[in-house]
Image (tube, rainbow, N blue to C red):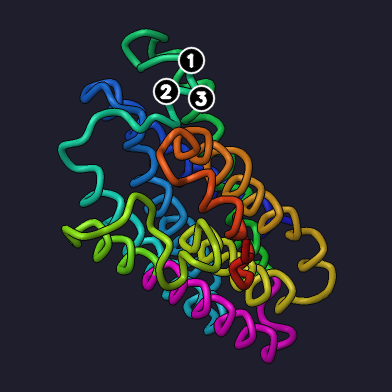
């Protein structure tokens, strides 16, 4: 029980420090969407403190996987958002810009929620640090699922970047993975965290797996409903050609395009 409170406290403190620093930066630059860059950094921090506490091959493997994922994601979002204004998703979530709604509203609706989510999504990392590997084969199955997710994210982002550079592009990106799912990057993100749960939660035993199941479920909920696909779709549906694209393409799970 002592180990549980120690690891949980370290993970909570890490999430709190990252989100506090991010909130202060957001107030300074007037843009809440900087939290998207901090999201990956916060989870990398949780993975690192768990690996340092446990010192097992399982925790260090998970730390490497989360660091590769989080580093790539944070750098990609930073480059994409550099020089841009506020993300429309956060304007919709807050009911206005940061200057309009005030810093307190942003802290309550974004930074506290994101900090709690970092701790919750990091539960499989904490379970691995406390219980250690019980079923090593599931750790490697989890790593394979993580790899599938990273491939989806990376390939989807690269295909979208190529589309944006194409002067003859159509009104909607519907090539490659984007012909099978409207959000390959979000689907890949979900695979990453189901893989981390397999390797860290279920790989540490059936009880840690059961207790940490809310982590990938919550991550998937965020990606699909809270700050991910559904919220983005509200903006995208106003673009010419997007409703027709949505009618023939799966929103989340990759499926063959519908005809007609």
Q: Which mark is residue 93?
A: 3
Q: Which residue is mark 1?
A: 95
Evaluate if marks 2 and 3 touch, with contact meaning CB atoms under 8 Å apart.
yes
Q: Which residues are magenta?
A: 131-155
Relative to the observer, which residue lies in front, 55 or 178?
178
Q: Which residue is mark 2?
A: 91
* 147 within the magenta span: yes
**Residue 155: horizontal and vertical position, in percent?**
38, 73
In the image: residue 139, left or right of residue 70? right
Secondary structure of the residue carrying numbered label 3:
helix
Secondary structure of the residue carrying numbered label 1:
loop
Residue 7 shows in the view: no
Label 1 and label 2: CA atoms lie apart by 6 Å
Label 2 and label 3: CA atoms lie apart by 6 Å
Residue 21 position by quadrant: top left
Q: Is residue 65 above or below residue 98?
A: below
**Residue 9: horizontal and vertical position, in percent?**
58, 46
Give the residue drawn at x 31%, y 11%.
Answer: 99
Evaluate if marks 3 and 1 touch, with contact meaning CB atoms under 8 Å apart.
yes
Relative to the observer, which residue lies in front, 247 or 148?
247
């Amino acid at each position: 029980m002592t180990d549980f409170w120690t690891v949980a406290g370290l993970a909570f403190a890490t999430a709190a420090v990252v989100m506090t620093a991010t909130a202060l930066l957001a107030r300074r630059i007037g843009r809440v969407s900087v939290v998207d860059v901090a999201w990956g950094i916060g989870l990398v921090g949780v993975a690192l403190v768990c690996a340092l506490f446990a010192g097992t091959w399982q925790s260090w493997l998970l730390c490497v996987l989360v660091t590769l994922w989080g580093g790539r994601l944070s750098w990609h979002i930073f480059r994409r958002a550099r020089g841009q204004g506020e993300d429309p998703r956060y304007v919709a979530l807050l009911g206005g810009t940061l200057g309009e709604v005030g810093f307190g509203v942003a802290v309550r609706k974004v930074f506290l929620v994101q900090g709690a989510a970092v701790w919750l999504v990091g539960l499989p990392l904490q379970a691995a640090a406390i219980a250690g590997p019980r079923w090593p084969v599931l750790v490697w199955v989890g790593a394979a699922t993580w790899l599938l997710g990273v491939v989806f994210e990376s390939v989807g982002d690269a295909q979208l970047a190529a589309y944006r550079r194409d002067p003859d592009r159509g009104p909607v990106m519907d090539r490659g993975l984007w012909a099978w799912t409207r959000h390959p990057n979000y689907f890949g993100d979900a695979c990453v965290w189901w893989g981390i749960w397999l390797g860290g939660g279920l790989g540490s035993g059936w009880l840690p797996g059961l207790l940490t199941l809310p982590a990938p479920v919550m991550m998937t909920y965020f990606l699909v409903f809270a700050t991910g696909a559904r919220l983005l779709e509200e903006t995208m549906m106003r673009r010419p050609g997007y409703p027709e694209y949505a009618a023939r393409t799966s929103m989340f799970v990759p499926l063959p395009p519908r005809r007609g």
